Amino acid sequence: MTSENKTNMTEMTKARAARTLAKYPQYRGHFDNYILVQINRQIKTKFGIAFEKGDYAIARPATSRPEFGSRMTWEFRTVWSDRNNIDTSVPEKYLTVVA
């Protein structure tokens, strides 16, 4: 994928997500710093399938590690699901940063 295609895909996805939440003023600018990622496996949530393997999506640039005790070693990234129209926590190991 060329740099121009990555930029176009990122901006189109951000715009689509922003339109989805446009009626909620607290989300204005919410996706401004999101980056492009590719999902490496199917991800299911309570809302159904959020991502299929190979999907491109936008995500926050930083990862987080929930405080579930010392045994929790996974890092997560907040990723916007176009299918479910909601931010979804995805384990870092299930995605690849594209841009």
Image (cartoon, grey):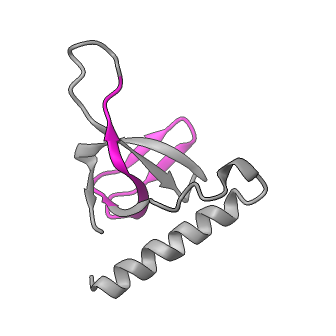
Q: Is residue 22 left or right of residue 95?
A: right
Tell me the residue at 36%/84% (across/down).
5
Residue 83: x %, y % from top left: 56, 57
- Extreme residue toward the right, this view: 23
Tell me the residue at 28%/67% (across/down).
98
Residue 38: x %, y % from top left: 32, 62
Q: Is the magenta region chiefly helix, strand or loop?
A: strand
Residue 42: x %, y % from top left: 36, 50
Instruction: Work out whether residue 59 or residue 95 is closer to the camera in this orientation and state it.
Output: 59
Quadrant position of the N terminus in the picture: bottom left
Tell me the residue at 45%/60% (across/down).
33
Please tell me whether residue 59 belongs to the stretch shown in magenta: yes
> Against 76, is 12 above or below?
below
Residue 94: x %, y % from top left: 27, 47
Q: Which residues are magenta?
A: 38-66
Please tell me whether residue 63 belongs to the stretch shown in magenta: yes
Instruction: Work out whether residue 31 or residue 43 is closer to the camera in this orientation and state it.
Output: 31
Tell me the residue at 52%/62% (across/down).
32
> Against 6, is 68 above or below?
above
Quadrant position of the C terminus in the picture: bottom left
